Amino acid sequence: MDRDKLAVLAISESGFIFDPVTGHSYTANSTGLRILELLKDGKDMEGVKSAMADEYEAGEDELSVDINDFIENLKKYFLL
Amino acid sequence: MKKEYVKPYIKKQTAGVMNKFGVTYNKGHREEIEGVPVAQITDKFGSPVFVLSEKIIRERYRTIYSYFSSKYPKAKMSWSYKTNYLDAVCSVLHQEGETAEVVSDFEYQKARRLGVPGNKIIYNGPYKPLESIVTALKEGAMVNLDNFDEIIKAEEAAKSLGKKFPVGIRVTMDTGVYPQWSRFGFVIENGNAFNAVKRIQHSDYLRLEGIHCHIGTFMLEPNAYKEAVKKVVQLMRKIEKEFEISVSYLDFGGGFPSRNKLKGTYLPPEVSVQPVENFIDAVADTLMEELEPKEYPEVYLETGRAIVDEAGWLITTVDAVKRLPDGTKSYIIDAGVNLLYTSAWYNYHVEIDREIRGAYENSIIYGPLCMNIDVVVESAFLPPLPKGTRLILSPMGAYNMTQWMQFIRYRPAVAMIMTDRSVEQIRRPETLQDIVGPESVPAKLKKFNFKE
């Protein structure tokens, strides 16, 4: 997973995300922000899932599907 | 303590994309249909399941008939079997007083089997086998003939019964709408319809009793019915004068729209589809303008979709969630286009059975068939749906339960919510035996030789 693009993102606590390289901006909700943080910290899929499972009331199956979907979205936006 | 989980989202901000119209979408959810919990229906009948409401069918019929009969003294309505010929649906409408309008020998037999007498059946359609015309004439049905070959066929049928029978003709005309439905019946403008009447009146076995037309389907313009009434009444006058007969019925068919959203229409159906009363006004007001009281014939409407479409739903279940390569969210549900013939031209209203928090996005809903064309809803604005979410699609009551096909999967149960809110199964789910029953395998094909 190439995280160079994630590393340069300016992420505010309110969910506003700015990419200084492309000039594009994004919004994310709190769980989206948390996944971004975990990815930026170098966690892999399993690591993200495990951290999210510790923090949120969600089953592992649901987290797997949702994290996978979130990562697909990041790829769509060329952020990964 | 763990935090509440909301499905994650990230969305790119775009500027300069504007829409002239604000559209509404359902941000709520639907836990019940006509007072019955969705979960109670699926627990009993499984998923997917079609659901019909007896109450709404009756109410829609009564609204239309009472309005029509308040405006025209000899108003009649006949239930269009092809729209939904499930026995229970037909029975509700026959209880209300509608006769049966059928377009094939199969539908004729179905109506008779249900207990509808021959003289309460209108037999339309462009193809009527000889034997079916014999039966229909013998049993007193109103037979509307479509073409010259059919006149000859009806004459042969009447001759075999040894007496003269009343028949109707189907006519077609330009009512100002495009595309014109020109394939059903005899053309009025070029004299074809008049010649057909001439042919009938010269027969020893047939006499003209009525005129039928069906100008189109899902008509959005009531003025087309005004034109139809004017042209049919003119034809009736000409026929009555020329042959010194009295035409006893006119039948303006169906074609009134429901509040379904046609693909390619920009506005929501609440805006683009006029109320059914406007269509009845077009028919009844024009009749009253064109006719003298002494000549009022019986006038039939064969409204199907406008009665039953909004009385039907499909409950279906999300089985999988997928992100397509272009980033579009997609869902796979357990009901496909084999059950939903009308998905080819409608964008269904999609509701969910529970509150789901998260960002809404345009999503595609695919069916379960191993076919690329199995797209049930091309674009629905939905929150992130977990597997197992029930979707309630509507309106569903018209044409799906007649045009559905057994393909790849079985056809599901159909349930009816009765007026007392009890729920009855009116068609059980198909079984393997229903499908293989008519098949047979030649003896030489019965032994298999699988390679090791």
Image: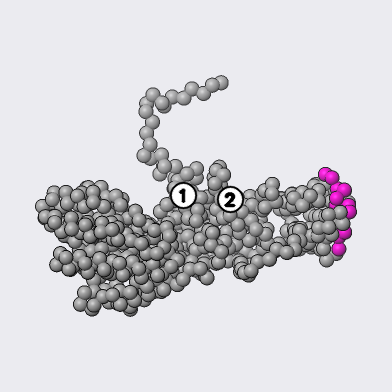
Mark number displayed over residue B393: none
* Residue displayed at 46% across by 25% down: B448
* Residue displayed at 37% across by 28% down: B442
Query: Residue B92 lies in what quarter of the image?
Result: bottom left
Q: Toward the viewer: B63 or A51?
A: B63
Residue projecting furthest to the front: B190
What chain letter is assigned to the residue under label 2? B
Instruction: Write down the region rendered in magenta.
Output: A1-12
Q: Secondary structure at mark 2?
A: strand
Quadrant of the frame with the N terminus of chain B: bottom right
Find out whether residue A53 is within the magenta segment.
no
- Residue at numbered disc 1: B411
Quadrant of the frame with the C terminus of chain B: top right
Q: Residues within 10 Å of mark 1 (few under 14, many from 20)?
A: many
Q: Secondary structure at mark 1?
A: loop
* Image spot of residue B331 (x, y percent): 62, 52
B264 sits to left or right of B101: right
